[in-house]
């Protein structure tokens, strides 16, 4: 059967997607007596379009497609995250364009608009995921704000609250003056910027600070206990004339102080710096709130009260100059927290919030990895995981937002941190907590599919999400949520820069699939890459993989141009030709190598192995050697092509399915997705 002269991915991909959908090949089935392979999709935020990071879901698809072909019951369950702060910001931005704000339209109308925005985004992202060929079971689609997932959130909160693991208290948090809410560490992006380091007189000392405006909240000065310059001052007090009157200040010693920074003396402002807050806790220092939630100085700043931080800094510096207390100014390049959503500089400040006591949960999560119940790939990230959990702080779970899960306590208006609901994802997607009626009769999805097999995600959210999934799911079920944590790297451009739509760095994955085909993008995202390693990718690599799709197509055209009905043999071929024997041996070696690599989660190297075999050995050498003895070599040509399509399928599903459908095989299956995976 002849193939068209050229491969048209635009026609093939749409047609193939319909074939898969109609065939129901991706539906996870409960098969009694067989252990399933299960992945829950890291839920994309309902904030618009997929980005290059989401294209790395291809690693999960490779896993799922291979396991399905190996005959293992396979479920890859999709879903979406309601992304409370992101959606709230985007809807507020829309309102601003209309000359309105959320307070003017009221909570009910705002939530209605947020719901519509999220629904529209979900539809768009689902379409994009399907275009990328991901073999997800859409019959089980979940959403962190739907009825089942909302019930899971309430149940988990109530359990923790009754056990005394949730409390309300005052603590230093990341605060966004723009979004008017506490935010997580992940949403607090530390961006490098150049500012000024001010050296100022401070009683008997000269000290350096980037934030002179917070001096009204200082309650001590600190030095390193081993700094010989200041030994005689440790434990003593001094009085100095501040810009708003005389202040008494104690000199303390703390190992958190860097003697090499500035003059080695630090002003301690416990209410507005995380390090200073911890120093204050250790030394029982008073905490003064000098900056409010709107980013303005409080009454504690005297005549400077009401000034926004930038204006206050300018005013303080001018007065210090006038008093002769500003010694010098130096430029400094450092990292400053910015809200990931609105871009405003964040303020560390003391705030009354709701917290989870994480230490008891962390101990169980540490043990799960130490005991081998959970394996982290690559293993080097175990050290980072343990360090974070051993030094964990209580988790601030309240947000001053309207969009999201309301804290299920009377009189509380705050919503929950998005990470709270996503930490329950591995159990909530299967209907946890199950009603009693669901436990009677046949096994439920929860009984069969939980615990899941793999959590595959970027290494950058090992702490923010994966560790919390482990802590929460262990607490709720007594079982770890997955057996393997596979961490991929960040997607970067050819210069090593992180993709950024706003900065014009990188590409839109769907633009690349339109241009070069989905298979080319998929292969370029994994080829040669290792777990945990950042991936440098540009259009040139995708174009090279498009050339590989053309190579596959042309080789298949050559093999299929010689019409034959053929049954792939189970026994070895009866041939003495050295080229035949060589290619069969090379195929056998490639099958073994590919299986070994994939069993050890080395998908990038597996892709490389198959690529090199097909292009260099099968096409460039073997096919060329058969042109003068076509009839004799045809059975082996056909066999090697059929086996190669199977090996390539998890990586490049569209072109392999299209060619498979044209193969003149006896007893052919309805789809390559359910064919038998090659093994030795």
Image (cartoon, rainbow, N blue to C red):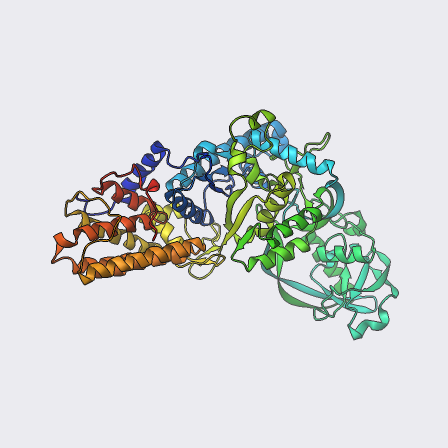
Horizontally, residue 320 falls left or right of residue 571, namely right
Whether residue 538 is visible to the viewer of this picture, yes or no, is no
Which quadrant holds residue 601? bottom left
Q: Image point 45% across, 55% down: which residue?
A: 600
Q: Quadrant of the N terminus?
A: top left
Does residue 199 appear in this view? yes
| Front position in the image: 333 or 551 | 551
Q: Position of residue 569 (x, y in %)?
A: 24, 47
- Counting the numbered discs, the total is 0
Q: Specify whether 295 is left or right of 613.
A: right
Query: Residue at (30%, 57%) from the top-left corner?
Result: 588
For residue 447, which quarter of the picture?
top right
In the orientation shown, which residue stands out farthest toward the bottom? 228
| x, y percent for residue 452 | 52, 42
Relative image position of residue 611 (x, y in whole percent): 32, 57
Which residue is rendered at x = 51% and y = 28% of the image? 442
Residue furthest to the top: 437
Q: Camera-side residue: 217 or 597?
A: 597
Question: Is residue 578 shown above or below 368?
Answer: below
Residue 188 image point, x, y percent: 61, 50
Decide: is 101 above or below 441: below
């Amino acid at each position: 059967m002849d193939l068209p002269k050229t491969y048209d991915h635009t026609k093939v991909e749409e047609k193939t997607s319909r074939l898969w959908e109609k065939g129901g090949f991706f539906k996870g089935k409960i098969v009694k007596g067989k252990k399933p392979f299960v992945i829950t999709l890291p839920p994309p935020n309902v904030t618009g379009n997929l980005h290059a990071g989401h294209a790395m879901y291809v690693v999960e698809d490779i896993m799922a497609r291979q396991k399905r072909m190996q005959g293992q019951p396979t479920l890859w369950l999709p879903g979406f995250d309601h992304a409370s702060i992101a959606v709230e910001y985007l809807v507020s931005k829309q309102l601003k364009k209309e000359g309105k704000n959320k307070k003017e339209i009221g909570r009910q109308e705002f939530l209605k608009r947020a719901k519509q925005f999220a629904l529209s985004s979900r539809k768009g992202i689902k379409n994009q995921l399907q275009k990328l060929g991901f073999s997800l079971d859409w019959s089980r689609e979940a959403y962190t704000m739907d009825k089942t997932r909302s019930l899971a959130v309430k149940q988990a909160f109530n359990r923790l609250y009754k056990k005394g693991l949730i409390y309300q208290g005052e603590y230093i948090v990341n605060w966004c003056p723009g979004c008017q809410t506490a935010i997580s560490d992940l949403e607090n992006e530390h961006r490098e910027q150049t500012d000024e380091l001010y050296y100022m007189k401070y009683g008997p000392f000269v000290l350096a600070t980037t934030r002179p405006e917070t001096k009204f909240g200082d309650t001590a000065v600190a030095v390193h206990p081993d700094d010989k310059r200041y030994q005689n001052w440790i434990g003593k007090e001094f009085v100095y004339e501040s810009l708003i009157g005389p202040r008494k200040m104690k000199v303390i010693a703390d190992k958190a102080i860097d003697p090499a920074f500035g003059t080695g003396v630090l002003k301690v402002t416990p209410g507005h710096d995380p390090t200073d807050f911890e120093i204050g806790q250790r030394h029982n220092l008073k905490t003064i709130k000098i900056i409010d939630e709107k980013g303005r100085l409080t009454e504690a700043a005297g005549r400077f009260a009401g000034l926004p931080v930038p204006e206050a800094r300018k005013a303080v510096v001018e007065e210090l100059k006038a008093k002769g207390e500003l010694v010098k100014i130096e430029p400094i390049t450092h990292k400053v927290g910015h809200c990931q959503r609105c871009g405003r500089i964040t303020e560390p400040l003391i705030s009354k919030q709701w917290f989870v006591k994480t230490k008891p949960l962390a101990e169980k999560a540490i043990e799960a990895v130490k005991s081998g119940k959970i394996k982290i790939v690559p293993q080097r990230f175990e050290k980072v995981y343990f360090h974070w959990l051993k030094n964990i702080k209580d988790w601030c779970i309240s947000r001053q937002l309207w969009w999201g899960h309301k804290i299920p306590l009377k009189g509380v208006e705050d919503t929950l941190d998005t990470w709270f609901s996503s930490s329950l994802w591995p159990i909530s997607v299967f209907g946890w907590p199950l009603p009693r009626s669901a436990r009677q009769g046949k096994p439920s999805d929860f009984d069969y599919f939980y615990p899941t097999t793999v959590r595959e995600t970027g290494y950058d959210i090992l702490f923010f999400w994966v560790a919390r999934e482990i802590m929460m799911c262990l607490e709720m079920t007594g079982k770890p949520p997955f057996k393997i944590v596979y961490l991929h790297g960040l997607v970067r451009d050819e210069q090593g820069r992180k993709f950024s739509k706003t900065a014009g760095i990188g590409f839109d994955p769907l633009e690349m699939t339109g241009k070069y085909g989905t298979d080319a993008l998929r292969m370029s995202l994994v080829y040669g890459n290792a777990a945990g390693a950042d991936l440098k990718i540009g259009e040139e690599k995708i174009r090279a993989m498009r050339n590989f799709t053309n190579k596959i197509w042309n080789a298949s055209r050559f093999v299929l141009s010689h019409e034959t009905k053929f049954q792939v043999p189970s026994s070895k071929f009866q041939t003495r030709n050295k080229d035949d024997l060589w290619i069969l041996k090379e195929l056998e070696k490639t099958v073994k190598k590919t299986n070994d690599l994939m069993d050890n989660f080395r998908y990038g190297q597996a892709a490389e192995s198959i690529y090199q075999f097909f292009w260099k050995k099968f096409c460039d050498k073997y096919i060329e050697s058969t042109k003068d003895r076509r009839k004799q070599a045809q059975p082996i040509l056909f066999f090697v092509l059929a086996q190669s399509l199977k090996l390539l399928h998890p990586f490049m599903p569209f072109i392999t399915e299209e060619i498979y459908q044209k193969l003149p095989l006896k007893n052919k299956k309805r789809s390559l997705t359910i064919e038998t995976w090659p093994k030795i």
